[in-house]
Image (cartoon, helix red, strand yellow):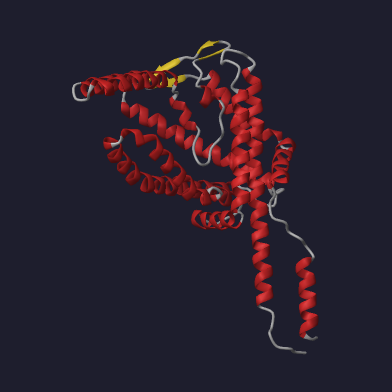
């Protein structure tokens, strides 16, 4: 068989199955269709929000506020009067934050975790009355609660992501306890890696900004905006790093490499997809958070948020899955064309 016939047959084989790159609207529709077909997935965010709504309010206000007020008093002896006015304003903000902050919110882990609407609301009450307040007695107790919540949140978040990835791939991924614990290990390693990278990149810049702001205070907000944009630009290629872990990647580093390759190949489309996903999720969260926490209508917001947030997550898995399929298919076709023999033969 001559080279021309071999090439013709190979080209027909390569073109027999057309793999298209991921597109915005079909990807979002596919994600929401997956959730509609497996509606039990929204129980993860719904149950977490219900726990934040009706569970205890674990606070560190009595532990942190005295130390904070003592710091303000000490700073008042050193800084000028105009600075003290700013400190008093920040004191009110921090006091309000400590009033609403629930230590149990650390159950919402990043980058893998269960999304929550009630974290943005930070309720003090519910339709049955005020939340039961538990004040932390000391720092050791506080750190113990934080560590337990982070561990539980990461385990539940990994289970949530794993189930979403499985239904997105239409059960092509095998799921068992061994797979789950491998995903959990890689997620933990990836979280540590991203945390260390963020600190490594941001800490020197923040120190530099603090030094510059001490001479030119008016530049503070502009410099922080520049730093934020820089970090987003730098970390954006890693946005799908966690997705690869739940799509069968053997380790966290390979998952990060695949994420960077995918984003670089589809950067304009990926940026648009992420922008629409964030706007859709955060924009509707403003609607879901409209009822007050003592109104039963908040249930509508909790279920609406559960469906939308799970749908957006599923759409991101669809985007990653289709993008990797297209990228691997394109690499396979390109390599097949390169490896064709250059001389005629029988």
Image x and y of residue 16, in percent: 80, 65
Q: Is residue 314 above or below residue 182?
A: above
Q: Quadrant of residue 314?
A: top right
In this view, the residue in front, 267 or 341, is: 267
In this view, the residue in front, 168 or 327, is: 327
Relative to 202, is 211 on the left or the right?
left
Which residue is rendered at x = 44% and y = 23% of the image? 101
Q: In which quarter of the image is residue 59?
A: top left
Q: In this view, does 31 lie above or below 128?
A: below
Report whether residue 135 is seen.
yes
Image x and y of residue 183, in percent: 54, 48
Residue most extreme to the top: 129
In this view, the residue in front, 182 or 62, is: 62
Residue most extreme to the left: 77
Image x and y of residue 92, in percent: 37, 18
Image quarter where the C terminus lies is bottom right
Q: Is residue 243 above or below residue 39?
A: below
Task: Give the number of marks.
Answer: 0
Q: In this view, does 293 lie above or below 261?
A: above
Q: In which quarter of the image is residue 288?
A: top right
Report whether residue 67 is seen.
no
Image x and y of residue 11, in percent: 77, 72
Which residue is rendered at x = 66% and y = 35% of the image? 41
Which residue is rendered at x = 56% and y = 46% of the image? 180
Image quarter where the N terminus lies is bottom right
In this view, the residue in front, 75 or 221, is: 221
């Amino acid at each position: 068989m001559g080279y021309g016939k071999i090439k013709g047959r190979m080209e027909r084989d390569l073109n027999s199955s057309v793999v298209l790159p991921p597109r915005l609207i079909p990807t979002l529709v596919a994600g929401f269709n997956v959730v509609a077909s497996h509606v039990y997935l929204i129980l993860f965010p719904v149950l977490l929000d219900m726990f934040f709504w009706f569970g205890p309010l674990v606070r560190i206000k009595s532990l942190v506020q005295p130390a904070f007020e003592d710091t303000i008093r000490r700073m008042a002896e050193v800084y000028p009067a105009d600075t003290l006015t700013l400190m008093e304003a920040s004191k009110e903000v921090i006091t309000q934050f400590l009033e609403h902050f629930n230590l149990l919110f650390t159950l919402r882990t990043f980058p893998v975790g269960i999304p929550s609407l009630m974290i943005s609301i930070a309720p003090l009450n519910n339709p049955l009355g005020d939340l039961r307040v538990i004040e932390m007695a000391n720092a050791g107790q506080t750190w113990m609660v934080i560590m337990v919540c982070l561990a539980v949140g990461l385990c539940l978040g990994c289970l949530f992501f794993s189930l979403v990835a499985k239904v997105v791939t239409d059960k092509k991924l095998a799921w068992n306890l061994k797979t789950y614990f491998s995903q959990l290990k890689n997620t933990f390693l990836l979280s540590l890696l991203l945390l260390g990278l963020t600190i490594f990149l941001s800490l020197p810049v923040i120190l530099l900004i603090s030094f510059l702001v001490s001479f030119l205070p008016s530049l503070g907000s502009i410099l922080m905006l520049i730093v934020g944009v820089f970090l987003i630009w730098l970390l954006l290629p890693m946005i799908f790093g966690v997705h690869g872990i739940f799509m069968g990647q053997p380790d966290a580093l390979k998952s990060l490499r695949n994420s960077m390759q995918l984003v670089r190949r589809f950067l304009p489309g990926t940026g648009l997809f992420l922008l629409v996903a964030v706007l859709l999720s955060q924009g509707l969260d403003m609607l879901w958070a409209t009822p007050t926490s003592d109104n039963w209508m908040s249930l509508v917001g909790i279920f609406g948020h559960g469906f939308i947030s799970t749908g957006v997550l599923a759409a991101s898995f669809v985007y990653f899955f289709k993008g990797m399929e297209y990228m691997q298919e394109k690499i396979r076709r390109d390599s097949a064309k390169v490896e064709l023999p250059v001389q005629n033969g029988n």
